[in-house]
Amino acid sequence: MTVLSAQEGYRLWAATYADETAISFLESELTADLTPPLQDLRLLDAGCGTGRRLSGAGAALAVGVDISPEMLAAGAGRDLGVETMVGDVRDLPLPDRCFDVIWCRLVIGHLPDCAPVYRELARVADAGARLVVTDFHPAAYAAGHRRTFRHGLQVHEIEHYVHGLDQHLAMAGAAGWRLAESRSAAIGPAARPFYEKAGRAALYAEHEGLPVVLALAFDREG
Ligand SMILES: C[S@@+](CC[C@H](N)C(=O)[O-])C[C@H]1O[C@@H](n2cnc3c(N)ncnc32)[C@H](O)[C@@H]1O
C-alpha cells in the first residue's frame, strides 16, 4: 500500500469522509467531555476537515480552517453561521488572540513536528482559552494500526507521525499551554457497531481494549 500525503489522502477521502468511524465516534465523545459550554464563546476548529463538528456546536462564532479545499467543499451543507477558510494550522490566516476555544482534532499526527502547531494555536488563543487536541493514539500505531480509508476498491494509507505524550506536553508547555486533562479512548462496546457495519465483527475481539484516541485539554496561560 502506498502512503499518501495528507493533502492527497484527504483530496480522495473528502467525498466519503462524513461517514463516522469507530475512531471518529470515540474522538467526538472525548472532545465533547473536554469542551466547555460554547454559547457566548468564539470557537476555532483548526484542521476542521469538512467542518462537520462546527455545525450545531452552538458557539457564538464558529470558524474552521483546513488545508484541503476538497474537504471544505465536501462540507458545503454545514450551518450558515459557520465560516471556513483554506489554511495551514501552522500559519493561520487569522488575527492574534481571537478565540476562547480551539479544537485541533485528529490533525497533529499528520505533521512531522507538533511544536509549530502549538505555537500558532497559542497566537490565536485569547488569555485563558481552552485547547482540545486529539490524535491517533501512539499505542494503536505501535500495535500496527494505520490511518487508512477506502476509496472505490482500494484501501489507502495517509502519512502519520507518532508524537508521544511527553512530546505533546513539552511542545505545548513551551508555547504557553498548561495541561488541564489527558484522556484516551479504547475500542470497546461503543465501537462494536462500526465493526459490524463494516463486516469486520471478527476483528472486534482482537482490537478490544486497544487505545485508539489520545485527547489532551490545555488552557492558555495569561
Ligand atoms: C482526520 S481529518 C480530521 C478532520 C476534522 N478535524 C474532524 O475531526 O472531522 C484531518 C484533517 O486535517 C487536515 N490537515 C492536515 N494537515 C493540515 C495542515 N497542515 N493544516 C490544516 N489542515 C490540515 C486534513 O486536510 C484533514 O481535513
Image: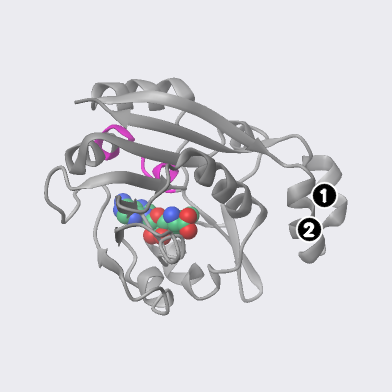
Snapshot quadrant of residue 131? top left
In this rendering, would 55 be left or right of 82?
right
Say what secondary structure mark 1 lies in: helix
Nearest the eye: 148 or 45: 45
Check residue 193 in the rendering and tell me which mark sits there, or answer none. Answer: 2
Residue type beneath disc 2: Pro
Counting other residues with Cα less than 10 Å from the Cα at mark 2, is it few (<14), some (14-19), or many (20 or more)? some
Residue type beneath disc 1: Leu
Q: What residue did someone put label 1 on?
A: 203
In this rendering, would 126 be left or right of 213?
left
Q: In this view, does 131 lie above or below 23?
A: above
Give the percent coordinates (x, y) of residue 119. Answer: 22, 34
Nearest the eye: 51 or 36: 36
Q: Is residue 4 visible?
A: no
Give the percent coordinates (x, y) of residue 3. Answer: 50, 54
Give the percent coordinates (x, y) of residue 54. Answer: 40, 61
The picture quadrant for ligand 1 comes to: bottom left
In this rendering, would 85 be left or right of 107?
left
Of callouts 1 and 2, which one flags the residue occurring earlier in the amino acid sequence?
2
Snapshot quadrant of residue 86? bottom left
Residue placed at 55% from the left, 50% from the top? 28
